[in-house]
Image: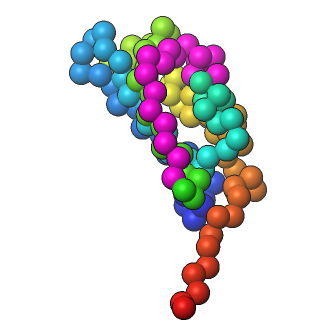
């Protein structure tokens, strides 16, 4: 994530449901931050997206991998076309809320010295 540049510090994928009344899946991968889950939930709520289930994971080196099952009141979660604009706004809000810029990413590189 760190080597990809600041534009790629948040990997976000929205997977619409095949069924009209089922939840869509939102995958997020990013450098974990203090209170990031709270911040993500706040941004989703403020965007009119309800979370019905979440699965969150953080690697030992601080990469967060989150999965949210979502429904939205302001757009059809099963239709990619109606999701495009709200999801771009959501991505921008998440990047801002999580302070995902190059300057704020902690350096977690490790140097391994052969024994």
The span picked out in magenta is 42-59
Outermost residue, bottom direction? 115
Q: Quadrant of residue 103?
A: bottom right
For the C terminus, the quadrant is bottom right
Residue 100, position as x, y percentages in the image: 67, 46
Q: Would you place residue 74 above or below residue 36 in this image?
A: above
Could you tell me which residue is drawn at 35 percent across and 18 percent down? 23
Could you tell me which residue is drawn at 50 percent across and 28 percent down? 87
Could you tell me which residue is drawn at 29 percent across and 22 percent down? 17
Q: Is residue 8 visible?
A: no
Q: Is residue 51 visible?
A: yes
Outermost residue, left direction? 18
The type of colouring in the image is rainbow
Could you tell me which residue is drawn at 61 percent across and 73 percent down? 110
Residue 37, position as x, y percentages in the image: 60, 32
Residue 70, position as x, y percentages in the image: 43, 20
Q: Would you place residue 111 above or below residue 58 in this image?
A: below
Q: Would you place residue 64 above or below residue 38 in this image?
A: below
Residue 25, position as x, y percentages in the image: 38, 28
For the N terminus, the quadrant is bottom right
Q: Quadrant of residue 113?
A: bottom right
Q: Quadrant of residue 36?
A: top right
């Amino acid at each position: 994530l760190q080597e990809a540049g600041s534009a790629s510090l948040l990997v976000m994928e929205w997977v619409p449901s095949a069924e009209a009344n089922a939840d869509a899946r939102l995958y997020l991968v990013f450098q974990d931050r203090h209170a990031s889950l709270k911040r993500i939930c706040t941004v989703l709520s403020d965007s009119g997206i309800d979370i019905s289930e979440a699965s969150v994971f953080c690697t030992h080196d601080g990469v967060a991998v989150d999965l949210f099952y979502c429904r939205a009141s302001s757009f059809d979660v099963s239709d990619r076309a109606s999701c495009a604009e709200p999801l771009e706004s959501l991505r921008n809000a998440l990047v801002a809320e999580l302070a995902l810029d190059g300057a704020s990413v902690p350096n977690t590189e490790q140097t391994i010295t052969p024994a």
